[in-house]
Image: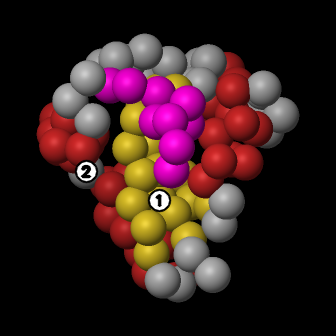
Amino acid sequence: MAFYVYIMTNRPHGVLYTGVTDDIAKRAWMHREHVLGGFTDRYNCEMLVWYEGHGSRESAFVRERRIKEWKRAWKIELIEDMNPGWRDLASEPM
């Protein structure tokens, strides 16, 4: 089973949320539809702008914790390396 670390935002260069899931398409949908509540609901983080696959839940959680500790500029660089146009990746085939 694959696990994913992902970053959601409300707009390009906006609020950033980092999370972990085992179903990236479903989780992005849940954020867009405000099913989860909490931070992403409060700040309207509906765009999936970055994700990375992992072979285990443990490695995904380790990566998530590291990214959450990063400076904002490092997170933006990570996003722009994969997705320079800040497209909503959930609207594209994965």
Counting residues from the N terminus, which is met first, the one under dot 1 or under dot 2?
1
Image quarter of the N terminus: bottom right
Please name which of the two marks, 1 or 2, marks the residue nearer to the observer: 1
| Residue 4 in the image, given as x and y percentages of width and height | 51, 63
Percent of width and height locating residue 92: 50, 36
User: Residue 86: where, in percent of width, then height?
Assistant: 32, 25
Span shown in magenta: 86-94
Q: Does the magenta stretch include residue 34?
A: no
Residue 74: mark: none
Callout 1 touching callout 2 (CB < 8 Å): no
- Could you tell whether 53 is left or right of 76 in the image? right
Residue shown at 64% from the left, 40% from the top: 28
Q: Quadrant of residue 31?
A: top right
Residue farthest along the right direction in this orientation: 35
Residue 18 visible in the current orientation: no
Q: What kind of residue is marked 1?
A: Val
Q: According to the image, label 1 marks what residue?
A: 5
Which image quadrant is residue 52 in? bottom left
Mark 1 vs mark 2, CA separation in Å: 14 Å
Q: Name the residue beneath numbered marker 2.
A: 70
The image shows a total of numbered marks equal to: 2
Residue drawn at x 65%, y 66% as measured from the top left: 22
Residue 49 visible in image: yes
Which residue is painted at 78% across and 27% down in the image? 34
